[in-house]
């Protein structure tokens, strides 16, 4: 018995003690068999309902959005990269470039290299791609302040020259001169040339995977 | 599970341990059933209301703060379930009366008056007497006598000062003494 009521029943309300004791001693009803099992089953059902509601309200819409995004991706629409030269060609824009992203200069060098090394590549596509490199080459023969980019562009122009693209020949010569005159930073011309050569095997040889990478980069 | 205090079990239930919650159900199922029976509901309604209270307790388990007494939390929820039930019951009865008046027929209203398996005449008399008290007096007896809660906790659950609990308690006991004499 709690001390509050006990205190009162020991004092002026002592006459009520038998009543309180009889109230407490009165038989108590008991729940039927299986009551607690029923409660827990009800809770399990409520939880299942909550999970279903969560799935309907959150997970399914998110999954639908994700599926829609995936479906719209060029890989799945078949509008661009399908690991083929055709898809790379399909990515070319009307000005001859392949991308508007910040990686566009690199994409252009890679694309020119791949197109120049593949005899089956569309000649016009290659020439338009080379024109972009020629247009963006500065008066000194380089491309901005990034020595690696200049080295890669020179390598791309070399490949285009070898493939017989006439516009590539003087640009390649100016680019080589630039690389000789500008050992930018710690990087010597030899190192730049090695960098370009190291990049080359990953970019050439008609590798359709590389074509796909370029096409994907162009799409991003 | 058997040895753990209520607050610890609630804490575990809040983390999704259903075995801990099942133990709380075992501990309080008969207490809640009698809580509702003393409000004058039938045995079946009492079981339904006890079940609803446990479902509400499960839904609110993350709101429970371990520093609060578990019984305070439980009886607050039980009180809310009871209020909701009698409000709905009042609407249902009002509708029945309206329909009866409209039809100008007096059908036999068969309210369930079934008793529980372990019920007895003595237990029924006490419940019936408590149920006839006004809600303010009945709640004080329910929590202070049957649940043996200290006046401070009774006051916290009912939202009244401790002094009011004390005065209501002895008014209620005097009335019960007369009823059961």
Image (tube, coloured by chain):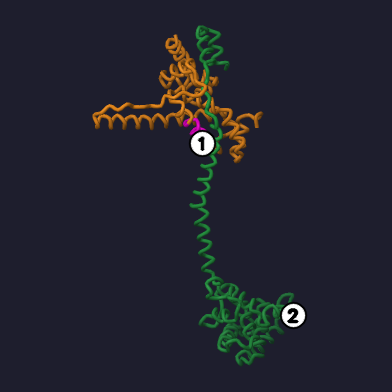
Chain colours: A green, B orange
Q: Which residue is mark 2?
A: A194
**Chain letter of the residue carrying label 2:** A
Answer with the quarter of the image where residue B89 lies: top left
Q: Nearer the viewer, residue B145 or A33?
A: A33
- Relative to B146, say whether A89 is above or below: below
> Which residue is at a point 34% across and 27% down the rendered structure image?
B109
Q: CA distance from mark 2 to mark 1?
A: 72 Å
Segment colored magenta: B48-57
Q: Which residue is mark 1?
A: B55
Give the quadrant of the N terminus of chain B: top right
**Dot 2: few (<14), some (14–19), or many (≥20) neighbours within 10 Å?**
few
**Dot 1: few (<14), some (14–19), or many (≥20) neighbours within 10 Å?**
some
- Is residue A120 left or right of B93 when viewed as pictured? right
Q: Nearer the viewer, residue A22 or A122?
A: A22
Q: Position of residue B122 (x, y in %)?
A: 48, 15
Q: Is residue A220 visible?
A: no
- Is residue B131 left or right of B67 when viewed as pictured? left
Q: Nearer the viewer, residue A165 or B28?
A: B28
> Which residue is at a point 60% across and 81% down the rendered structure image?
A85
Q: Position of residue A185 (x, y in %)?
A: 72, 75
- From the image, give the main secondary structure of the stretch colored magenta: helix
Answer with the quarter of the image where residue A109 lies: bottom right
Q: Callout 2: helix, strand or loop?
A: helix
- Relative to B56, say whether B159 is above or below: above
Q: Position of residue A61 (x, y in %)?
A: 49, 57
């Amino acid at each position: 018995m709690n001390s509050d009521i006990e205190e009162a029943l020991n004092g002026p309300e002592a006459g009520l003690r038998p009543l309180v004791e009889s109230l407490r001693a009165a038989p108590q009803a008991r729940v039927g068999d299986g009551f607690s099992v029923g409660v827990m089953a009800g809770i399990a059902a409520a939880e299942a309902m909550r999970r279903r509601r969560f799935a309907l309200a959150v997970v399914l819409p998110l999954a639908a959005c994700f599926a829609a995004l995936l479906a719209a991706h060029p890989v799945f629409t078949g509008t661009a990269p399908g690991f083929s030269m055709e898809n790379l060609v399909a990515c070319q824009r009307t000005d001859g470039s392949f991308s508007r992203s910040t990686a566009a200069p690199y994409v252009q060098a890679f694309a020119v290299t791949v197109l120049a090394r593949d005899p089956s590549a569309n000649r016009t596509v290659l020439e338009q791609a080379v024109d972009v490199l020629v247009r963006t080459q500065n008066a000194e023969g380089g491309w901005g302040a990034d020595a690696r980019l200049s080295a890669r562009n020179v390598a791309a122009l070399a490949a285009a020259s070898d493939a017989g693209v006439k516009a590539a020949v003087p640009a390649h010569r100016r680019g080589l001169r630039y690389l000789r005159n500008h050992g930018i930073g710690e990087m010597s011309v030899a190192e730049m040339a090695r960098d370009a050569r190291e990049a080359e095997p990953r970019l050439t040889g008609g590798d359709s995977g590389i074509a796909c990478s370029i096409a994907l980069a162009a799409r991003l | 599970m058997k040895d753990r205090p209520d607050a610890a079990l609630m804490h575990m239930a809040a983390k999704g341990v259903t075995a801990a919650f099942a133990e709380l159900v075992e501990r309080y199922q008969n207490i809640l059933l009698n809580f509702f029976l003393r409000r004058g509901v039938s045995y079946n309604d009492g079981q339904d209301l006890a079940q609803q209270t446990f479902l509400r307790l499960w839904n609110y388990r993350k709101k429970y703060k371990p520093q609060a007494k578990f019984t305070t939390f439980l009886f607050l929820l039980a009180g809310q379930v009871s209020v909701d039930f009698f409000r709905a019951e009042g609407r249902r009865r009002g509708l029945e009366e309206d329909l009866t008046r409209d039809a100008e027929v007096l059908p036999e209203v068969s309210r369930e008056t079934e008793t529980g398996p372990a019920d007895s005449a003595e237990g029924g008399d006490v419940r019936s007497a408590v149920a006839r008290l006004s809600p303010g007096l009945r709640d004080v007896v329910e929590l202070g006598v049957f649940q043996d809660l200290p006046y401070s906790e009774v006051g916290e659950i009912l939202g009244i000062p401790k002094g009011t609990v004390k005065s209501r308690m002895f008014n209620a006991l005097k009335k019960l003494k007369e009823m059961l004499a």
